Image (cartoon, helix red, strand yellow):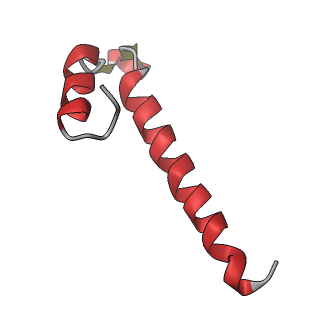
């Protein structure tokens, strides 16, 4: 791959990473782990509203 074409690959990696983070924020569920350690889910409606208000996701 010519060096001048690498930008397309970096752009794809950045976009895939952003998508993975958004999916993790939106599709999260409450978890209970070892020794009863609890990790509560984020409130889905509030996360979506915050992302929409910042223009991160389409309305």
Vertical arrangement, residue 50 with respect to residue 34, above or below? below
Q: Residue at x 59, y 57 (%)?
A: 13
Point 24% across, 15% down: residue:
45
Residue that sits furthest to the bottom in the current view = 3
Residue 10 is situated, as x and y percent measured from the top left of the image, at 59, 67
The residue that appears at 20% across and 24% down in the rendered structure is 49
Q: The C terminus is located in which quarter?
A: top left
- Coordinates of residue 12 in the picture (x, y in percent): 60, 56
The N terminus lies in quadrant: bottom right
In this view, 29 is above or below 4: above
Q: In the displayed image of the protein, which residue is found farthest to the right?
A: 1
Q: Position of residue 29 (x, y in %)?
A: 39, 15
- Taking the image as shown, residue 35 lies to the left or right of residue 55, namely right
Q: Quadrant of residue 56?
A: top left
Based on the displayed image, in which of its 4 quarters is residue 46 positioned? top left
Q: Nearer the viewer, residue 15 or 36?
A: 15
Write down the quadrant of residue 4 in the picture: bottom right
Residue 38 appears left or right of 53 = right
Q: Residue furthest front?
A: 59
Whether residue 58 sits left or right of residue 51 in the image: it is right
User: Taking 30 as reference, is 5 above or below it?
Assistant: below
Count the marks: 0
Residue 34 in percent (x, y) is at 43, 21
């Amino acid at each position: 791959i010519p060096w001048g074409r690498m930008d397309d690959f970096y752009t794809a990696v950045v976009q895939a990473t952003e998508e993975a983070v958004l999916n993790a924020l939106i599709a999260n569920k409450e978890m209970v782990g070892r020794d009863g350690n609890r990790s509560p889910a984020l409130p889905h409606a509030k996360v979506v509203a915050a992302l929409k208000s910042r223009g991160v996701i389409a309305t």
